[in-house]
Amino acid sequence: MALARIQIPPTATRGELITVRVAIQHPMETGFRFDHMGRVIPKNVINTLTCNYNGVEVFRAEMGSGISANPYLQFYMRAEASGELVFEWVDDAGERGSERASLTVAA
Amino acid sequence: MADRSRRRLLKFSVAVAAAGALVGRSGMPRAQLAVQSLEPLISKVTGGATVTAGRVILDIPRLADNGHAVPLKISVASPMSEREFVKAIHVLSERNPRPHVAAFHLNPHGGRAEVSTRVRLNGSQRLTVLAGMSDGSWWSGSAEVEVTETACLDET
């Protein structure tokens, strides 16, 4: 199972713009490489990653082999209410992963 | 005598250089893809809409030592309000074997139209980023990157 790290501030004030950073452990195999037997290593990249905050989609990324191994993404989000940030992703092999982080918004 | 051996050496080195060039060409089929036009891909992404240069700023090193992971920050000038926001950001490479590097979908909940990531680049090129706005307009920005060690050629 892929390992992922989400970094967000634990607390925020209402309306504050917070930085969301996520890094997922994944080879992001291009399909252009060969193994030691000369066989093509099939392409396997995380093709879709979504970030939902309290059930509302905040950010979505569609990635190809042009994104580096162990993909890293940074984006912004406006903190409106306390809740949970849910990341979900799927790779070409059909393997799914998810990670959560909670955010407390002071009134 | 000395002149003759010098000539022979010269002939030999020319032959070696020529052979090297031939092997180099056939042995590495994917070495440095030629720069390809992004026009067809741009019109596919935008659906034929006109693209205006501006509003998109790329923050990427001018000289990237390692093409396997080049830090890229994209910022788009937009208020990111309910009425006017950036819907999509597309990263296009003119030299990668798969030119459509990534697409990011944003909405007003984001608050700021800025995305950072790391990309693979197959050689020195001009990287193009398209931004689609909520009003249907498309904007673009680009940056020239010099890549010393290219990605995608690693066959180990």
Image (spheres, rainbow, N blue to C red):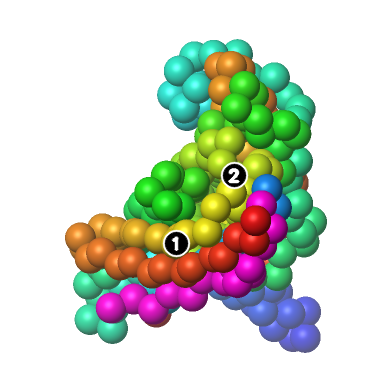
**Residue A12 on the magenta span:** yes
Q: Callout 2: few (<14), some (14-19), or many (20+) C-alpha neighbours within 10 Å?
A: many
Q: Nearer the viewer, residue B24 or B42?
A: B42
Percent position (x, y) of residue A66?
A: 48, 55
- Three-letter amino acid code at the position of disc 2: Gly
Is residue B36 visible in the rendered image? The answer is no
Q: Quadrant of residue A74?
A: bottom right
In space, the residues marked 2 and 1 are separated at their CA atoms by 15 Å
The residue identified by callout 2 is B110
Which-is-in-front pick, marks 2 and 1? Answer: 1
Q: Is residue A17 left or right of residue B35?
A: right
Q: Secondary structure at mark 2?
A: helix
Percent position (x, y) of residue A97?
A: 30, 67
- Identify the residue at image location x=68%, y=48%: A15
- Three-letter amino acid code at the position of disc 1: Glu
Percent position (x, y) of residue B126?
A: 68, 43
Q: Nearer the viewer, residue A15 or A86?
A: A15
Q: Callout 1: few (<14), some (14-19), or many (20+) C-alpha neighbours within 10 Å?
A: some
- Identify the residue at image location x=66%, y=34%: B80
Q: What is the total number of numbered labels drawn onto the structure image?
A: 2
Report the span colored magenta: A1-14
User: Considering only vertical position in the picture, is A37 above or below B27?
Assistant: below
Q: Nearer the viewer, residue B62 or B79?
A: B79
Q: Quadrant of residue B79?
A: top right
- Disc number placed over residue A84 in the picture, else none: 1
Quarter of the image with the N terminus of chain B in it: bottom right
- Identify the residue at image location x=49%, y=46%: A58
Quarter of the image with the C terminus of chain B in it: bottom left
- Disc number placed over residue A63 in the picture, else none: none
Q: Quadrant of residue B16?
A: bottom right
User: Considering only vertical position in the picture, is B70 above or below B39?
Assistant: below
